[in-house]
Image: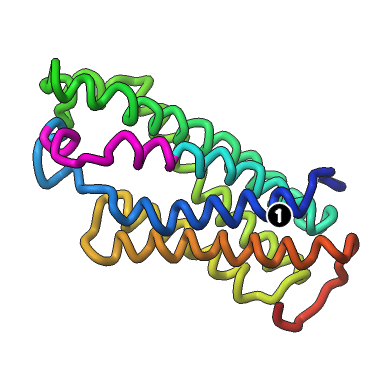
Amino acid sequence: MSSLRVSVRGAAICLGFSGFLVAVTLPWHPSIFALPVDEVVRGFAAWTELHAIGALALILAVVGASGLVAVHDGRLGRLGSLGLMITLVGSMGATWVLGVEAIVFPILAERAPELLALDGPLLTSPLFIGAGLCALGWPLGLALLGLAALRARVFHRSPCLLLALSGPAFLALDGPFVPIAGPLSAIIFGLAQVWWGWLMWRAAAAPSPKPSTHSF
């Protein structure tokens, strides 16, 4: 990818706000393994709002990821292109899943709770499983962008490493709803995106940032 023309400052706002939403909302997601899913949905008053906010965060993350590529002005190479593509596909899949969870799950929890069983027809359907697998690309794609940024050496290595490591950690810990470590990984993953949003905003004043080893 030689260059990607987007508003870096606009993308910085999107990525920073996306990370903020991730950090302040996802840690509150209740575990669906402690109780039957329908009971979890009925027992969590903000179920719909939480998943709607999550879907918004994913849409913003795509714009933010595009800006992260653009601010490097072609220096992320093929790894950056791959990371951006995986982020896009993953965000689409995760947005679909969150949309179903926000709209369909509360209805089924009241009218047909058996459909929400972990081994039930909805959660084991090929479409839902496929979308869930695609959703893995959201944090993994951002992690690849962090790794590509680390190789490009435009920004300090700390935010690059944090984004590269926090994405897989979020998947490994928050996905299975690991107590304490799971919510903490979501907070760190979100803060990594907030950090990058701030870096991109600052770098927007310099259209062609030069490779540097100083801290931002």
Q: Quadrant of the C terminus?
A: bottom right
Q: Main secondary structure of the magenta part?
A: helix
Tell me residue 30's x, y (percent). 22, 48
Residue that sits furthest to the bottom in the current view = 214
Local packing at callout 1 (Cα closer than 10 Å; few below 14, some 14-19, many 20+) is many
Question: Where is residue 127 drawn, in percent x and y?
Answer: 38, 20
Using the image, determine if residue 40 lies above or below residue 122. Answer: below
Residue at point 33% right, 24% down? 103
* Residue 123 picture quarter: top left
Residue 198 place in picture, x, y as percent: 66, 65
Q: Quadrant of the N terminus?
A: top right
Which residue occupies 77% across, 52% down? Answer: 8
Viewer-proximal residue among 185 and 29: 29
* Colour mapping: rainbow
The three-letter code of the residue at mark 1 reads: Leu
Q: Where residue 69 appears, x then y in whole percent? A: 74, 52
* Up-down relation of residue 107 to residue 37 (above or below): above
Quadrant housing residue 110: top left
Q: Which residues are magenta?
A: 39-54
Q: Nearer the viewer, residue 61 or 157?
A: 61
In the visual, does 144 lie left or right of 6? left
Residue name at image x 32 percent, y 49 percent: 175
- Relative to residue 92, is residue 157 depicted above or below? below
Quarter of the image for residue 46 reads top left
What residue is drawn where x is 19% and y is 41%? 44
What residue sits right under mark 1 in the picture?
Answer: 68
Q: In front here: 144 or 35? A: 35
Q: Is residue 49 magenta?
A: yes
SS for dot 1: helix
Q: Is residue 2 left or right of residue 78?
A: right
Query: In the visual, does 210 lie left or right of 149?
Result: right
- Name the residue nearer the viewer: 121 or 34: 34
